Image (tube, helix red, strand yellow):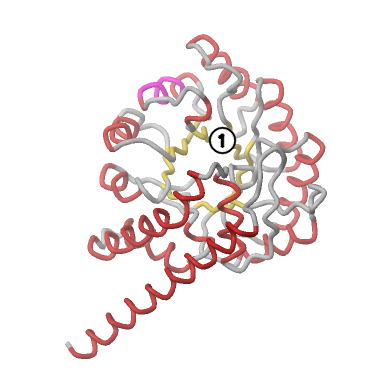
Amino acid sequence: MQIPSYLVSVPIPWNDDQSFDKELFTEILGELKKQYCDGLYLFGTSGEGYAITDEEFTEIVAHFKEQTWDFPGFLQVGCFGLSSAQVKLRCAVCMEIGIEQAQVTLPFWKELNDEELDLFFQDICHSFPEIKFLLYNNPRNKRKLKGWELEDIHKKYPNLVAAKTGSGNWMEIYELLTNSPSINHFLTEGAFPFGSTIREVGLIPSYNYIFTERCRMFFEAVISSERERAESLHNEIMEFHLKTALPLLNKGYIDGAIDKAYARLGGLNIPLTVRSPYQGLSIKDFEWLNDEVSQFKSGLENDLSCETSQTVID
């Protein structure tokens, strides 16, 4: 997994009866491949990797691989499960289909103790030495690993090569990045500029669904140390999430449902449906989000117009 890199999650379209819409999925992949990402990954939170059957997993991964034959970046698939056996079954499918990068979460029916944690990575890493594993270091796992823990696991199981961490205060992010120097790290928009001052990190954004070009501009500004531009775009992205994502999260929507709504407003032809028992945005809440996004876009256009006018005057 090349670092730094820009990794985009592929949302899965479901029909009203919650069956997989293969035609729409093909269309969505086609659009994402045209965008500015270095890698595509399937079955993260946006792809509802926690909610699919083994049969659906096999069908969708095979189609994902088939439709990305011309994609020059890297591919990754989320192999989630509540036991080592469930995760290994999905890893075996990926190997058979020809995908050798997998995202895993810790089993979360109960918090793993130290012995169980070691056994989990022994089970999957030793069983699939060819696969490069990324741990989704998510609080939903009940146990969020610290940097020194990731480093210890990597020393025993070197094909754990990366981690994605989407939450944490600055001290937690600092500890994570400094105490696990042997693995690559992916962060979300909030922590990405700070993390990049410590070491090279990758970005897994959601802002790209609506503002594809500006999100990539943010990534490029951060990794090239264009401080003023990076700070301006970071503030923009944080303001957007404050106005749009936070109210919806406070209403109880799962983040994948919000990502689907972003993707739809950004032009992807995707239904708002998410897998039961979770719920997609209601018509009322989607209309509210549409209004908020429209206002935000208008504000951006006004700001950009003012910047252009000031440049001409100067």
Q: Position of residue 14 (x, y in %)?
A: 75, 52
**Res 239 → quadrant:** bottom left
Q: Farthest residue in the front direction? A: 284
Give the residue number, with chain letter if any, for mark 1. 132
Find numbered disc 1 in the image and state the secondary structure of the residue it sits on: strand
The type of residue carrying mark 1 is: Lys
**Res 220 → quadrant:** bottom left
What is the total number of numbered labels drawn onto the structure image? 1
Magenta: main secondary structure: helix
Residue at image point 35% right, 62% down: 236
- Image quadrant in which the C terminus is located: bottom left
Q: Farthest residue in the left direction? A: 314
Q: Which residues are magenta?
A: 148-153
Q: Nearer the viewer, residue 92 or 105?
A: 105
Q: Position of residue 124 (x, y in %)?
A: 62, 23
Q: Is residue 150 magenta?
A: yes
Please state if 281 lies on the left or on the right of 90 as rendered: left
Residue at image point 71% right, 36% down: 95
Q: Eyeballing the image, is 237 above or below 53?
A: below
Q: Position of residue 255 (x, y in %)?
A: 54, 45
